[in-house]
Amino acid sequence: MKNDRYLEISNLVKAYPNPFGAEIKVVDGFDLKVRQGEFISVIGHSGCGKSTVLTMIAGLNPISDGGIVVDGREISGPAPDRSVVFQAPCLLPWLTASGNVMLGVKEVYPHASKQEKKDIVAYALSAVGLGSAMEKYPREMSGGMQQRVGIARAIALKPKILLLDEPFGRLDSLTRMELQDVILGVLSRDQITTMLITHDVDEAVYMSDRICMMTNGPGARVGSLMEIDFPRPRVREDMMVDDKFFAYRERLLRFLDECEHAKKSKPAAPAAPSGDAVKASPPRNFRQRMTDSIAALF
């Protein structure tokens, strides 16, 4: 029986100090329960804290208040049970596709044999359609192929939660649709609980079991949840001519439009500093520093 509270986010708060010393709560009281194996999208206007929530789930951004529980355990930092795919794949250019995926596999499966590690890498790359491009370097791959490597690197770790932070944002429309189907194909086989951050309403409806609509920030939280009643596997051609698809789309657009009107009528709050700033590492060999930084995520 699947756990209805596999990922549980309770009263989540992220606050940053403003220039005057007071705190600005970018996210304030975000509550969400995600079922095991569910695909949920988070949508909202720019600056509402979507990516902030995702990086807190990933353990890459400290929580100001509240808690996040994954499969019965409260998280306290990054771990391989939560894999992230960012908008940019961040591949190490001196490693092949298999080398980039192997980087995480070595960290997560230190006691596996050399052949077992190779098999895990081969399975992950084949699952995203790169079985014949395993030894290509990033410079030899298109943007879509590089993002496939990023997805393979994430699923190779067999995570409990797959976190997708606008992974198709830099791709053209056709490549974007191809990769949407790649991810849905992988998830249909491996049943990984997934959260997608997106600005694309059609993408959210097409891929999701539920959509979480966030209110404006600062003080953003869950504004509304919408169930998407389409069977899996999804067939794009059938969905795009179904009246339900357009009804879901209209409801999302209406919510976003209401948030936009509320934003225009509300006085602007002082800007909070970005939570993405990272202290520079001491100067040393660039390749080794980059390799160590990527490995630290696993």
Image (cartoon, rainbow, N blue to C red):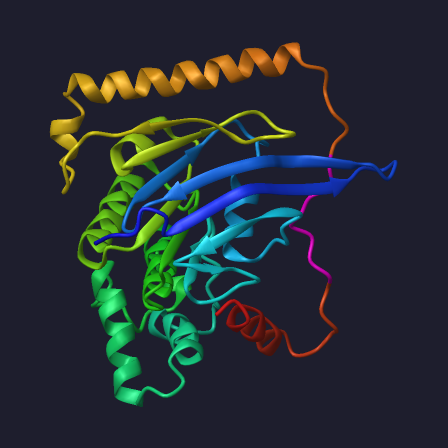
In screen coordinates, is 123 left or right of 64?
A: left
- Seen in the picture, residue 206 relative to 186 is either above or below; the reply is above
Residue at the (72%, 15%) spot, across then down: 267
What span is colored magenta in the figure? Answer: 272-279
Residue 131's x, y, as percent?
Answer: 21, 67
Residue at the (50%, 47%) spot, across then down: 54
Quadrant into which the N terminus falls? bottom left
Residue at the (28%, 71%) spot, across then down: 134
Residue 6's x, y, as percent?
Answer: 36, 52
Residue 60's x, y, as percent?
Answer: 58, 57
Q: Nearer the viewer, residue 76 or 20?
A: 76
Quadrant hosting residue 286: bottom right
Residue at the (16%, 27%) spot, across then down: 239
Quadrant hosting residue 190: bottom left
Q: Is residue 21 magenta?
A: no
- How many tags in the picture? 0
In screen coordinates, is 186 left or right of 250?
A: left
- Seen in the picture, residue 101 relative to 40 is either above or below; the reply is below
Residue 24's x, y, as percent?
Answer: 73, 35
Quadrant hosting residue 199: top left
Task: Examine the rendering and report whether any part of residue 266 can be seen.
Answer: yes
Task: Examine the rendering and report whether any part of residue 168 can be seen.
Answer: no
Q: Nearer the viewer, residue 140 or 199?
A: 199
In screen coordinates, is 81 left or right of 247?
A: right
